[in-house]
Amino acid sequence: MGHPDENVYPTATGHALETVKQHEAPQDLVFWAGWFCPFVQRAWIVLEERGIPYQYKEVNPYKKEKHFLDINPKGLVPAVEYKGRALYESLIICEFLEDAYPSHTPHLFPTDPFERAYVRLWVDHVAKNVVPAFHRLLQGQTPEAQAAAREEYYESLRRVSEKAKGPYFLGAEFSMVDVVLAPWVIRDYILRDHRGYSRDAVGSGWKEYAEKLSTRESVLKTQSDLEHYEPIYGRYLRDEAQSEVAKATRAGKGLP
Ligand SMILES: N[C@@H](CCC(=O)N[C@@H](CS)C(=O)NCC(=O)O)C(=O)O
């Protein structure tokens, strides 16, 4: 039997497909992506926000093909090749795209060193607390496990919400905190439909912030038709997914 996650829909659809078609020509920067992946979407949002020229290349990371393992030995998307050299890990790529294209705007990190560190602090919170709790809730199988994960997820979001100035995390400026969070916010309908999650229950202001992130142009332009996410998340909801993230969540380990 094949690896179940090999059966993901092969290409982007909807708005994301239009974006892909505009980025077929060769460029110094090659963006190795999987249309369905929230980690990919982070880097993709940065590329679109900052108008960076890039060539989009779809790869199915579950196949672990040699050509892709040569780019990212972990075999995970996203990865980038810049003038022939490779980088991977979504947060590292997001920072690289900020540093390597200084003349492009908007800047997603503030210029003041303290403010930059503050943004990194909250990016770190999203990576260490928000995303793992999302996955624990998604994959939780018993009512008890789901209730505990739901509370943990709410708590991780409340911490963001309490600090968010509105309309974005830092106020008027869209920043890297918004970027790294947005892919999970637009996927929260899965938790709403299957795990009793509601944006209202996070607390005052969250719904407005979530709506603001969900309707940002760069977020919409990197989003495929929702119906194609369903089969993928179905496997997570039944705790059958075999991705590295799913296996780590199941084993109670930190995410890859
Ligand atoms: N820590 C990595 C995680 C990337 C990741 O897990 N990507 C998934 C797709 S959403 C993947 O490539 N999965 C292939 C696998 O698990 O074998 C990052 O932030 O880039």
Image (cartoon, helix red, strand yellow):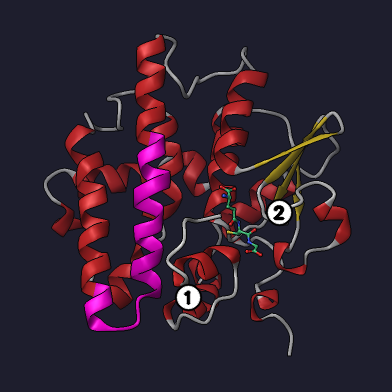
Q: Which residues are magenta?
A: 123-146
Name the residue rendered at 59%, 34% in the picture: 92
How crowded is the residue under tag 2: few (<14 C-alpha within 10 Å), some, or many (20+)?
A: some
Residue 231 in picture, x, y percent from top left? 54, 78
Q: In the image, which disc is placed on residue 183?
A: none
Residue furthest to the top: 112
103 shown above or below 9: above
Question: Is 106 a magenta residue?
Answer: no
The residue where tag 1 is placed is 236
Task: Tell me the quarter of the image containing the N terminus.
Answer: bottom right
Task: Tell me the quarter of the image containing the C terminus.
Answer: bottom right
Q: Quadrant holding ligand 1?
A: bottom right
Name the residue rendered at 61%, 19% in the picture: 99
Q: Amino acid at mark 1?
A: Tyr
Residue 50 falls in image quadrant: top right
Question: Is 127 a magenta residue?
Answer: yes
Residue 138 in picture, x, y percent from top left? 38, 70
The residue where tag 2 is placed is 74
Does any portion of residue 203 appear in the rendered image? Answer: yes
Residue 66 in picture, x, y percent from top left? 87, 59
Name the residue rendered at 38%, 26% in the picture: 119
